[in-house]
């Protein structure tokens, strides 16, 4: 797949088009919600998934994934994950097997459950928990992690579909009188951005930097302007060797999840791809270019580990963002967590 070029080698736009982005930014900058904004959804007393069932599902996953890691059982380990988590774990198992390295093991702290009151399938819930790397009984520092589990239909098992390391504390999540979290919707017009546009708008900042129009509604930080700065610096390093570096952050076709926050905003959990290329100028053949070292273990064919025109090296990322209500003056969407790993590499 060729990345779409912008005016310079390091300038690209996310999947949100200019016209749509302009409208979203203008509406957000106006600082007012639509006059006909609907009320937040209520639970209606429907609990297709109970708190106890969510807790049992989480406990089963921790038990089984820990056993799979100890035994290096990739086949079963991949059966209990889905969506972007499957893509990341599959790549990790492949790389570890190639290098002959034991599978990473983890220790989990005390979980906090966020179970939405859902009327029917698909069912899902999230767990916030401190996670430490376990190296032979020696625990590394705990990192606050948000894990999302989903069961699409009754005939399919529960799977871990997303896991995001948090850079900032979670906002307070709205709950009903029974302790169930309140889900939001992907197109909620009362928010600064409809949640379905949070990922593409973040991508516009990552691709174009703080001068992008999207920066009017996306806060700066490691996963936005910092991401752009890191990619720009890498591009400059590649250019010093006479090569071009291209990147594009774009939405992935995985499930997205939204919770209502206590202040009227939303917590949005979603996946993105970072597609990168290193290539000879003019897209012509030249001296072989090796794929980046951390991608090489993912590639089984030796011929694909170098490219005569270029190499593709792509990541899968999971993000968590806080989307404020439009009525909050001067607020921006803040990306508060991310996890990612190399998932595809190839020479061409």
Image (tube, grey):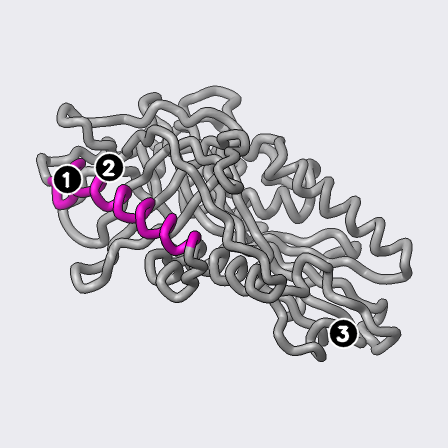
Among all residues in the image, which is located at the extreme front?
136
Look at mark 2 in the image and give the residue it sits on: 115
- Name the residue nearer the viewer: 111 or 335: 111
Q: Residue at x 13, y 45 (%)?
A: 48
Quadrant of the rendering where the C terminus is positioned: bottom right
Say above or below: 318 vs 344.
Answer: above
Choose the circle earlier in sequence order: 2 or 1.
Answer: 1
Q: Is residue 335 visible?
A: no
Mark 2 and mark 3: span between their CA atoms? 47 Å
Please state which of residues 28 and 280 is positioned toward the viewer in this rendering: 280
**Magenta stretch contains residue 342:** no
Helix, strand, or loop for circle 1? loop
Q: Please state the extent of the stretch shown in magenta in the rendering.
A: 47-70
Residue 171 image point, x, y percent: 40, 25
Horizontal relation, residue 2 to residue 121: left or right = right
Question: To which residue does mark 3 refer?
Answer: 307
User: Which residue is rendered at x = 27% and y = 26% of the image?
Assistant: 174
Name the residue rendered at 45%, 35% in the picture. 131
* Mark linked to residue 127: none
Q: Position of residue 259 (x, y in %)?
A: 32, 36
Q: On the image, which quarter does residue 229 sit in?
A: top right
Residue at point 50% right, 56% down? 88
Residue 69 within the segment the image draws in magenta: yes
SS class, disc 3: strand
Q: Position of residue 316 (x, y in %)?
A: 54, 55
Q: Tell me the residue that label 1 is attached to.
A: 50
Identify the main secondary structure in magenta.
Answer: helix
Can residue 168 be seen by looking at this rendering?
Answer: yes
Total numbered labels placed on residues in the image: 3
């Amino acid at each position: 797949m060729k990345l779409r070029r912008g005016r310079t080698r390091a300038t690209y736009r996310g999947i949100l088009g200019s016209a749509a982005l302009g409208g979203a930014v203008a509406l957000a900058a106006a600082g007012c919600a639509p006059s006909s904004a609907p009320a937040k959804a209520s639970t209606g007393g429907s609990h297709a998934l109970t708190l106890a069932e969510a807790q049992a599902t989480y406990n089963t996953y921790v038990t089984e994934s820990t056993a799979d890691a100890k035994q290096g059982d990739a086949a079963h380990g991949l059966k209990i994950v889905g969506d972007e988590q499957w893509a990341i774990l599959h790549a990790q198992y492949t790389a570890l097997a190639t290098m002959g390295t034991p599978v990473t093991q983890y220790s989990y702290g005390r979980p906090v459950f966020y179970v939405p009151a859902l009327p029917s399938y698909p069912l899902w819930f999230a767990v916030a928990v401190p996670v430490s790397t376990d190296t032979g009984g020696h625990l590394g520092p705990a990192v606050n992690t948000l894990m999302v589990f989903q069961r699409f239909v009754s005939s399919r098992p529960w799977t871990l579909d997303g896991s995001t390391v948090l850079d900032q504390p979670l906002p307070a999540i709205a709950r009903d009188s029974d302790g169930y979290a309140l889900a939001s919707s992907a197109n909620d017009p009362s928010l600064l951005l409809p949640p379905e546009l949070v990922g593409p708008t973040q991508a516009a900042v990552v691709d174009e930097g703080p001068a992008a129009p999207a920066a009017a509604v996306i806060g700066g930080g490691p996963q936005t302007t910092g991401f752009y700065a890191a990619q720009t610096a890498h591009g400059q390093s590649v250019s010093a060797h006479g090569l071009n570096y291209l990147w594009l952050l774009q939405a992935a076709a995985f499930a997205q999840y939204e919770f209502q926050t206590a202040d009227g905003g939303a917590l949005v959990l979603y996946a993105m791809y970072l597609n990168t290329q290193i290539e000879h100028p003019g897209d012509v053949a030249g001296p072989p270019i090796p794929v980046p070292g951390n991608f090489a273990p993912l590639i089984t064919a030796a011929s694909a580990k170098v490219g005569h025109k270029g190499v593709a090296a792509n990541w899968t990322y999971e993000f968590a963002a806080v989307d404020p209500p439009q009525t909050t003056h001067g607020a921006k969407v803040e990306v508060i967590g991310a996890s990612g790993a190399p998932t595809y590499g190839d020479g061409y």
